Image (cartoon, rainbow, N blue to C red):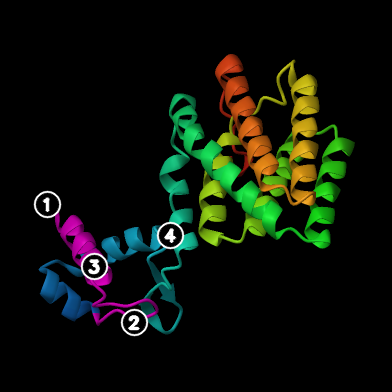
Amino acid sequence: MSAVDRAFHGLRHMIGTGRLGAGERLPPEGDLCEELGVSRGSLREAVRMLAALGVIEARHGSGTYVSQLRPEDIIGSLSLTLELLPLTGLLEVYEIRRVLEAHVAAQAAARSTPETVRALFALIETMDATDDPTEASELDHRFHAEIARIGGNPTLASLLSVFRARSRKYQVFTLPEGPELRRKSDEDHRILATAIADHDPVAAAGAAQAHVAQTERWLRAFMPPVEEDPEAD
């Protein structure tokens, strides 16, 4: 095991066992290096790795602290690895997404209010009005994120956001068949939103599961290339 790995797992053990609790400041570097048997450079690299995972955070002028360890934040860090999945790997994840999207849709149907229903249909109307596939994809993401938010579980919402972020890298709306696929997708959105507005958890779950399954079938059929990230240029 390398020195960086030893420092990483040592800090992880301290946090996992509760020796270092959420929001607690890390001990001085010298003390940690002595206890873990590593150099300052190795310790700092381990801290950077844990920070990337949302476990540790540096506060300017104050020091380095264990994060609040909120489940939704820790789950969100999965994007670091899920963003690397090829389409074949992403398709395996879709089975999980079908189950979770159905669950949050059912929860949203049970919890929806007139205000949240209006927000969903406003997003649908905006989607209908745009001819820009990129904007349509962003609005699609916001629509599903709003349903997850209404569902009331931030951790599930965070996990689904990670799944959708990778899915959006494989665009079917930009294909020649895109306009027809969008028409069907928009129709699915209306069915789903209507079930939520009707406070029908069973119908909402079925609509969400069917919608995600349809997207999965399109990805399998068309195998679109991954979209370039303009921010990476």
- Magenta-span inclusion, residue 5: yes
Determine whether, in the image, residue 62 is placed left or right of residue 174: left
Q: Residue at x 80, y 22 (%)?
A: 179
Neighbor class of circle 3 (other Cα within 10 Å; few <14, some 14-19, many 20+) is many
Q: How far is disc 1 from disc 3 in space, using C-alphas?
A: 15 Å
Residue range corresponding to the magenta coloring: 1-28
State which tag comes first along the sequence, 1 or 4: 1
Check if mark 2's residue and mark 4's residue have beta carbons within 8 Å: no
Q: Secondary structure at mark 2?
A: loop
Looking at the rendered image, the disc whose residue lies closer to the viewer, 4 or 3, is 4
Read off the residue under disc 3: 11
Read off the residue under disc 4: 74
Determine whether, in the image, residue 51 is placed left or right of residue 116: left
Q: Which mark is residue 25?
A: 2
Q: How far is disc 1 from disc 2 in space, using C-alphas?
A: 26 Å
- Residue 101 lies in what quarter of the image? top right
Quarter of the rendering occupied by the C terminus: top right
Question: Where is residue 11 drawn, in percent x and y?
Answer: 23, 67
Question: Where is residue 144 drawn, in percent x and y?
Answer: 67, 46
Q: Secondary structure at mark 4?
A: helix
Check if mark 1's residue and mark 3's residue have beta carbons within 8 Å: no
State which tag comes first along the sequence, 2 or 4: 2
Question: Where is residue 192 drawn, in percent x and y?
Answer: 74, 40
State which tag comes first along the sequence, 2 or 3: 3
Q: Which mark is residue 1?
A: 1
Q: Residue at x 82, y 61 (%)?
A: 115
Q: Amino acid at mark 3?
A: Leu
Question: Where is residue 181 drawn, in percent x and y?
Answer: 74, 23
Q: Amino acid at mark 2?
A: Arg
Neighbor class of circle 2 (other Cα within 10 Å; few <14, some 14-19, many 20+) is some
Q: Amino acid at mark 1?
A: Met
